[in-house]
Image (spheres, rainbow, N blue to C red):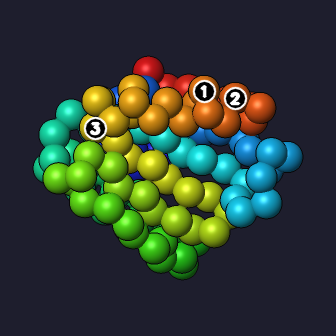
Amino acid sequence: MDALEEKKGEDIVLLDIHEVTSFTDYFVICTGTSNRMLNALADAANDKTREKHQRKGRVEGTPDAGWIVVDYGDVVVHVFDEELRRYYNLEELWKEGKILLRVQ
């Protein structure tokens, strides 16, 4: 989450969903304001995780699509543009989970 904050990601949320689903334990969700920023946020998350935990995430999506997912297995990072974040509203979809941290 530090990497997302450093790159000026907006409305960063850490959502604990380990009791709700079996495919992952946590979602990290954040918003970027441009295609360039979406790329920078996903790259920063991957770089920081590789540096601190020697793990490389599997990246899906593109900035042009408005949504990039970086999957680490137990943590999935979702980087959205503003419109798609509102549309998919993952916090509502996974409301049985617990918001552990929100950085506005």
Residue at disc 3, secondary structure: strand
Circle count: 3
On the image, numbered disc 3 is attached to which residue?
A: 81
Closer-to-camera residue (44/82): 82
Q: Secondary structure at mark 1?
A: helix
* Residue 92 percent across, percent down from the top left: 60, 27
- Give percent across and percent down for residue 30: 42, 38
Amino acid of disc 2: Lys
**In the orientation shown, which residue stands out farthest toward the top?**
104
What mark, if any, has residue 95 been given in the picture? Answer: 2
The answer to whether 94 is drawn above or below residue 27 in the figure is: above
Q: Determine the CA span between mark 2 and mark 1.
A: 5 Å
The image quadrant of residue 42 is bottom left
Q: Is residue 89 left or right of residue 59?
A: right
Label 2–label 1 contact, CB within 8 A: yes
Are there few (<14), some (14-19), or many (20+) residues within 10 Å of tag 1? few
Give the CA distance from mark 3 to mark 2: 21 Å
Assess disc 3: are there few (<14), some (14-19) or many (≥20) residues with their C-alpha within 10 Å of its C-alpha: many
For residue 92, the mark is 1
